[in-house]
Every structure is written in structure tokens, then in C-alpha cells.
Amino acid sequence: MKKILFISIFFFTGCATGPILYPNAYLQKVGEAQAHKDIAECEVLADQYVKSDAGIAAAKSTAIGGIGGAVIGGAAGAVTGDFGRGIGVGAAAGAAAGLVHGIIQASQPSPIFKNFMNRCLQEKGYEVIGWK
């Protein structure tokens, strides 16, 4: 039985994921080292043409978390008799949780970035079968 091997190539310049290439004739011809170079080249192009709003999204997530935390903290503080402290603690906890969520979301490439990378690699002769 013939086993199909998939080569997954990761790039770590701001993204935690990368394209998974099908081992077609072109990939086998050029080899993994050239594939890494081509992926890096496509990534540079994608960074130039696809504008990222990751920082704005992380800031929004932090603000929303802070507001939500303040509301919950205020409610808990009202029950326990320390409304002001409850708001402060809730806001801080919510903002921290929102920031972490925003950072995690920002580390993932956008669908537009992925589409750009897929097309760039396809034009070079590779077949992207997914992202990991």
C-alpha cells in the first residue's frame, strides 16, 4: 500500500500556523529547502499587500473584557458590600482575559492572508492542501 506523505512547513514570523503542502512533482523536484524559501517569499508579499488589524482587534478585546469584568465585578461587589472594589477587580480581571484572548486571535493569520499565501504558492507550482 502506497503511503502518501504530507510535508507541513511552518513559518514563525508572527504566525503560529503555516501551509501544508501536498508532495506533488514540483515539491519533490525543488525540495524542502526551496519550499521554505518560497513560503518565506510569499509571506513577505502577503505582509505587504494584506493589511492587518490585529492590534486593533486585541485592543477591542481588552476593552470589551474590561467592561464586562467591571459589570460582573460591580454586581459581585454590590452583593458583598464593596461595590467599588468589585468594579476594580472585575475590570482588571476582564481586561486581562480580553487581552489574552485578543493576542491568541491576533496570532492566527486572517482568511485573506491565507488566500494570498495559497495563491502565491500555487503560482509557484505548489499545492496547498490546508493550514496547521
Image: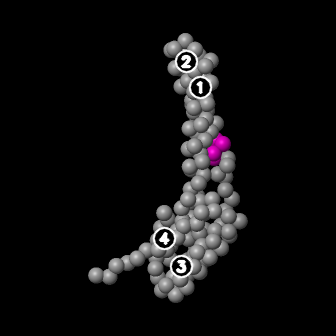
Tag 3 secondary structure: helix
Please give the residue where the numbered disc 1 appears in the rendered image. 89
19 to 103, vertically: above or below: below
Q: Are marks 3 and 2 in contact (CB under 8 Å)?
A: no
Rate crowding at label 4 as few (under 14), some (14 to 19) or many (20 or more) other CA atoms within 10 Å: some
Q: Are marks 4 and 2 in contact (CB under 8 Å)?
A: no
Rate crowding at label 2 as few (under 14), some (14 to 19) or many (20 or more) other CA atoms within 10 Å: many
Please give the residue where the numbered disc 4 appears in the rendered image. 8
Amino acid at pointer 2: Gly
Please give the residue where the numbered disc 2 appears in the rendered image. 77
User: What residue span does the magenta drawing correspond to?
Assistant: 57-61
Majority secondary structure of magenta residues: helix
| Picture coordinates of residue 107, whole percent (x, y) | 59, 54
Q: Tell me what residue is drawn at x 61 percent, y 29 percent.
A: 91
Amino acid at pointer 4: Ser
Cα distance in 3D space between marks 1 and 3: 51 Å
Cα distance in 3D space between marks 4 and 3: 10 Å
Ranked by sequence position, the earlier of labels 4 and 3 is 4
Cα distance in 3D space between marks 4 and 2: 50 Å
- Give the residue at the far front of this rendering: 33
